[in-house]
């Protein structure tokens, strides 16, 4: 264990008031009392209180009594005491901490009283974290001998509370994006609170409508208090086409509209995954069992993986994880994959996700930084080169992850084991990972996941934290839902990535004559045919091919880009600007490829003429940090970007169009003529990794959620073509297809 456990039962105890359950994001005030144990606390001894780093409630502080998060500390005998608040001092995962030191010794049964969110001097209190947690504990460690060697209280003497959802606010209706005619499917309903937690405080009759006949679809269902979701199974649609389901309340108000359900007689169907997240056993929230339950029953995933950091996974927890994936795995219904996150430092390859096709396989750790057991130390793999070597005979998949320690795929790479790279997670959007692969001539697909730390795989909201993005999803093109088929599909790169929306995306290639399909990790010919899927590697004698793209969004489409490797081939705006009163201001980029990537933005827009009619925010996931209209000419906002983007849409009156738009940022002040923006968008670069601000004109309303492309594409003569699609919706969600790799014979 990470801390000394000497005489742990004699280290005292702690209580908290009030006890019980508290709503996410609510304002509270707590009195935490530590009662000194058998040895007392010597002069300069003390205690520490540890919280997990993703706690996103009030920032703890001790200097401003009237502001949130104010903390006071005192002793029962009024002896002097000092304390400090540290963000990264205790051992992971309790890096946020309050350190309290006695200036005079304390005896057994003396008390240290900590007031969290002390309201006595005008503070509004302590705002709770935005995500639910069954056991939110205050980990107390004791230094009775003033040695700086802290001993934890036993679990039964550590105080805890529960964080529960607030009232439901946003309804979600989740459906499959592609099914065959007459194949059974389900739709799922939930209502999330303002922070993205599924709410169990709904008691309502709900009514269902569709633009086609759906066999077994009920007219109404009940979602009762205490239940987090409602699943309607055994549904079928006979005819081909694109359909949706609408959810209404008793008064006829539309509560939610499902993603589009495409019914087509293809060889495959769509299955959605979030294969990357953590639980409290490592650095996340709630138990691993609750993690898989959320993925299956609250975010309605088809496939889920748990990727705890390897240096925190004990042999016992690895065994427990394997038992859990075996328990939750149900062919045809829900796949739970055994795996872990190999968490080597960037210098030796960086983070990589590892999944096995079956349980009972070894864990090859990057280190044992937080594991005090070396029983199977021979299995350690200290570099990604060593990891690849140890996995070469395993039925495993590996994906480079770029969350904390970014993965350097130029350091080590194996085409058979690593068919794809991660392009998006809750950490942000990382297209440079794909670009690195192109530069190295690797054939890779693209995936997205959450790397969620808040116990919500498949619906990972960032809340009020440094995670700047909603967690991603991967759509897998599978003939059937089982592990063997999934692993085969993964190696063929037949999947695409989204920022979390269930966008339907079909990208394929067709040829006039038969072309050669190459095997997944080399140039051996598998067979010949005319039609190919995204991710395929192809060899042809022809100088061109037909690109076929079909997009059905969950929101109107704002932009579609066609790439050939690093080259932008075509930029498509699927609309015409009839009116010119709507402008989008977009902040994007990151500082660096590592943990310090986050870009803080402070923006203010001012009109010189006319007035602001209304605004709309895009990718402002924190309800506290939305753009605000200060007056008819001024808007202000704060946001963070970590590779992705946040945007504010502004509707202006006619008079404004003849004036200037002034934008003050924490980087540089900008001044543009609005008439110039109508003619051509403008981009301002601020350094880092593509840190920029863009201003463009959009139609007052976008209506087109579907778009098809049929395009003749010329092939390179010498180098392999790498054709992929990037889709951006009006609501900020994006999707990327895995590239088509097409090699032209000389």
Image (cartoon, grey):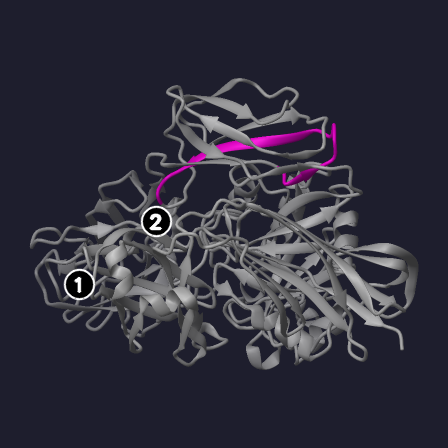
Q: Which residues are magenta?
A: 176-194
Q: Residue at x 70, y 63 (%)?
A: 739
Position above or below: 251 against 335: above
Position above or below: 607 against 328: below
Magenta segment: does it hold 179?
A: yes
Residue 128 at x, y = what percent?
28, 49
Q: Nearer the viewer, mark 1 or mark 2?
A: 2
Q: Between residues 585 and 525, which one lies in front from this camera angle? A: 585
Q: Between residues 163 and 659, which one lies in front from this camera angle? A: 659
Left or right placement of residue 181 versus residue 303 in this view = right
On the image, which quarter does residue 316 sit in?
bottom right
Residue with the mark numbered 1: 106
Position above or below: 46 against 298: below
Q: Secondary structure at mark 1?
A: loop
Residue 364 visible, this angle: yes
Q: Residue at x 65, y 56 (%)?
A: 339
Q: Between residues 310 and 267, which one lies in front from this camera angle? A: 267
Residue 215 at x, y = what percent?
66, 21
Residue with the mark numbered 2: 130
Q: Between residues 279 and 676, which one lies in front from this camera angle? A: 676
Q: Residue at x 91, y 60 (%)?
A: 526
């Amino acid at each position: 264990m990470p801390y000394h456990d000497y005489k742990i039962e004699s280290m005292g105890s702690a209580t908290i008031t009030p006890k019980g359950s508290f709503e996410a994001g609510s304002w509270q005030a707590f009195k935490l009392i530590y009662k000194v144990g058998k040895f007392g606390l010597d002069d300069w001894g003390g205690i520490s209180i540890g919280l997990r780093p993703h706690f996103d409630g009030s920032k703890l502080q001790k200097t401003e009594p009237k502001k949130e998060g104010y903390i006071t500390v005192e002793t029962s005998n009024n002896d002097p005491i000092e304390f400090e608040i540290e963000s990264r001092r205790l051992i992971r995962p309790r890096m946020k901490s309050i350190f309290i030191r006695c200036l005079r010794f304390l005896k057994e049964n003396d008390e240290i009283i900590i007031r969290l969110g002390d309201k006595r001097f005008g503070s509004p209190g302590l705002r709770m974290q935005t995500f639910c947690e069954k056991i939110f504990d205050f980990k107390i460690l004791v230094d009775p001998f003033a040695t700086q060697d802290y001993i934890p209280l036993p679990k039964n003497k550590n105080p805890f509370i529960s964080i529960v959802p607030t009232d439901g606010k946003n309804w979600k209706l989740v459906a499959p994006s592609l099914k065959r005619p007459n194949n059974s499917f389900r739709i799922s309903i939930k209502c999330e609170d303002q922070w993205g937690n599924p709410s169990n405080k709904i008691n309502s009759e709900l009514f269902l409508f569709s633009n086609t006949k759906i066999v077994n679809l009920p007219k109404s269902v009940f979602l009762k208090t205490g239940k987090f979701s409602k699943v309607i199974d055994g549904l079928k649609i006979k005819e081909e086409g694109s359909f949706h389901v609408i959810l209404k309340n008793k008064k006829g108000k539309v509560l939610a509209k499902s993603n589009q359900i495409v019914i087509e007689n293809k060889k495959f169907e769509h299955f959605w995954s979030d294969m990357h997240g953590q639980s409290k056993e490592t650095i996340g929230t709630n138990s691993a069992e609750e993690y898989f339950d959320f993925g299956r029953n609250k975010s309605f995933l088809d496939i889920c993986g748990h990727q705890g950091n390897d240096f925190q996974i004990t042999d016992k927890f690895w065994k427990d994880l394997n038992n859990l994936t075996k328990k939750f795995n149900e062919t045809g219904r829900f796949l739970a994959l055994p795996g872990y996150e190999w968490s080597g430092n960037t210098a030796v390859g960086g983070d990589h996700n590892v999944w096995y096709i079956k349980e009972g396989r070894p864990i090859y750790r990057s280190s044992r930084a937080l594991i005090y057991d070396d029983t199977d130390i021979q299995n350690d793999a200290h570099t990604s080169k060593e990891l690849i070597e140890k996995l070469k005979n395993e039925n495993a998949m590996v994906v480079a992850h770029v969350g904390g320690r970014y993965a350097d795929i130029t350091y080590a790479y194996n085409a058979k084991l690593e068919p794809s790279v991660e392009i998006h997670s809750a950490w942000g959007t990382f297209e440079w990972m794909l670009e690195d692969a192109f530069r190295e001539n690797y054939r890779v697909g693209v995936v997205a996941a959450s790397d969620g730390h808040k116990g919500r795989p498949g619906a990972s909201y960032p809340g009020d934290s440094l995670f700047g993005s909603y967690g991603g999803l991967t759509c897998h093109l599978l003939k059937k839902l089982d592990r063997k088929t999934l692993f085969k599909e993964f190696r063929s790169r037949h999947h695409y990535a989204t920022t979390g929306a269930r966008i339907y995306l079909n990208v394929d290639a067709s040829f006039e004559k038969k072309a050669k399909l190459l095997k997944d990790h080399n140039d051996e010919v598998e067979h010949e045919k005319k039609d190919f899927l995204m991710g395929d590697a192809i060899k042809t004698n022809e100088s061109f091919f037909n690109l076929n793209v079909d997009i059905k969004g969950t929101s109107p489409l704002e932009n579609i880009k066609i790439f050939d490797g690093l080259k932008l081939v075509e930029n498509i705006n699927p609309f015409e600007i009839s009116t010119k009163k709507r402008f989008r201001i977009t902040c994007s980029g990151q500082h660096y490829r590592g943990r310090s990537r986050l870009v803080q933005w402070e923006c203010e827009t001012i009109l010189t003429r006319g007035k602001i009619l209304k605004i709309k925010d895009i990718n402002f996931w924190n309800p506290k940090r939305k753009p605000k209209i200060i007056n008819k000419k001024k808007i202000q906002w704060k946001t963070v970007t970590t590779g992705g983007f946040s945007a504010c849409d502004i509707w202006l009156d006619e008079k404004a169009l003849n004036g200037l738009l002034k934008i003050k940022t924490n980087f540089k002040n900008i001044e543009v003529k609005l008439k110039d923006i109508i003619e051509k968008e403008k981009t301002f670069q601020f350094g880092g990794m593509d840190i920029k601000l863009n201003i463009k004109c959009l139609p007052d309303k976008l209506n087109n959620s579907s778009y098809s492309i049929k395009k003749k594409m010329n092939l390179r003569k010498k180098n392999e073509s790498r054709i992929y699609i990037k889709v951006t919706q009006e609501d900020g969600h994006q999707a990327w297809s895995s590239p088509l790799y097409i090699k032209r014979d000389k």
